[in-house]
Amino acid sequence: MDQKLYDYSPVTERPPLRWPGGARVAFYVGLNIEHYRLDAPSTSTFPGTAGLVPDPLNYGWRDYGPRVGIWRVIESLDRHGIRASALLNSAAGERYPQIVEAGRARDWAWLAHGRDNSTFHSDMTAGEERRMLASIVGSIERTTGRRPRGWMGPALTQTFRTPELLAELGLSYVLDWTNDDQPYRLNVPGMLSVPYSVELNDIGLFVGKGMTGPDFVRVVKDQLDRLHADSTADSGRVMALALHPFVVGQPFRSRYLDEALEYVARHPGVWLTTSDEIAEHYARTAPAAAVPGAEVTSTAS
């Protein structure tokens, strides 16, 4: 079946997209703050025990993130003046209040990232999904003091109804459809897709592809340099860096995250921002009826 959630739009035929201050690339860190169930398989570093319950090897690897790894990541973000876009499982918000407090003190953006990261967002009736989403969003609002504006499903999962149900709850964008370097409107009133990345993602790079720290730095640099070159003075791009504290927060990788963020922060023409601010800016400045090749007048400053 063909998808009907969004229309085809080649990047070469769109109205110009302008970021604040004349920036050419809007950069944000998608910081995954996740809780994993002890009684269910999930992301693993060693497949040999992944099906066991309990699985101390892989569960402990993941649990390193909220206990230790995230604090190294926070230090690096602080050093380079970068606020996180926190992709928060509601179960993580309920269990790790010290992390939430650290994010509140730094004015992070908070996105709903499902209940936990061992349970994919699928196989529900409309009523079940509506209740689950309301519970997730309500929990995150209670723990963070701010109602989330964006959504990314666990493992980027959705049902066919998810964007519409999220819009009912007042959310305005999703990250799950990783098919563009610019935001775009979905065929659901009030809903956008904002770029995220499964390629520029520490799990994929370090765990999936076996890259080293220097490899990671080179990939981040190459991504930014090419996006900057692709962008003309009036057609900006988005660069999302997806991080998981149990991966990039390991001691031997922390220096390479620092090197990568330093390169981004010092690069000319980069807007260090959050996914919330990207979505808000696009919704405010890009005309709702934009079609490929149409003229657009931006109000960006």
Image (spheres, rainbow, N blue to C red):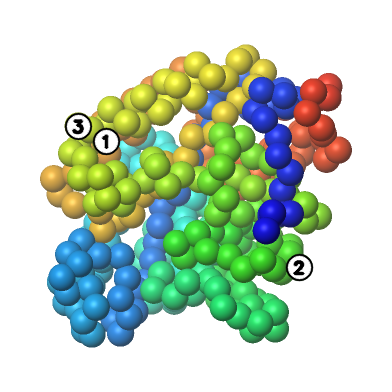
The amino acid on which the numbered mark 1 sits, given as a three-letter code, is Phe
20 with respect to 101 (left or right)? right
The residue carrying mark 1 is: 216
| Residue depicted at x 42% and y 20% | 225
Q: Is residue 301 visible?
A: no
Q: For this rendering, which residue is in front, 219 or 73?
A: 219
Please tell me in which quadrant of the rendered image residue 129 appears.
Answer: bottom right
Q: CA distance from mark 2 to mark 1?
A: 39 Å
**Helix, strand, or loop for circle 1?**
helix
Residue sticking out furthest to the front: 1
- Please count the marks in the image: 3
Report x, y in % for residue 59: 23, 73
**Helix, strand, or loop for circle 2?**
helix
Labels 3 & 1 near each other (Cβ < 8 A): yes
Q: Is residue 76 visible?
A: yes
Q: CA distance from mark 3 to mark 2?
A: 44 Å
Report x, y in % for residue 102: 39, 58
Q: For this rendering, which residue is in front, 102 or 155?
A: 155
40 with respect to 148 (left or right)? left
The residue carrying mark 3 is: 214
Determine crowd level at label 1: few under 14, some 14-19, many 20+ residues with C-alpha closer than 10 A.
many
**Helix, strand, or loop for circle 3?**
helix
The residue carrying mark 2 is: 168
179 with respect to 247 (left or right)? right
Q: Quadrant of the N terminus?
A: bottom right
Choose the circle earlier in sequence order: 2 or 1. 2
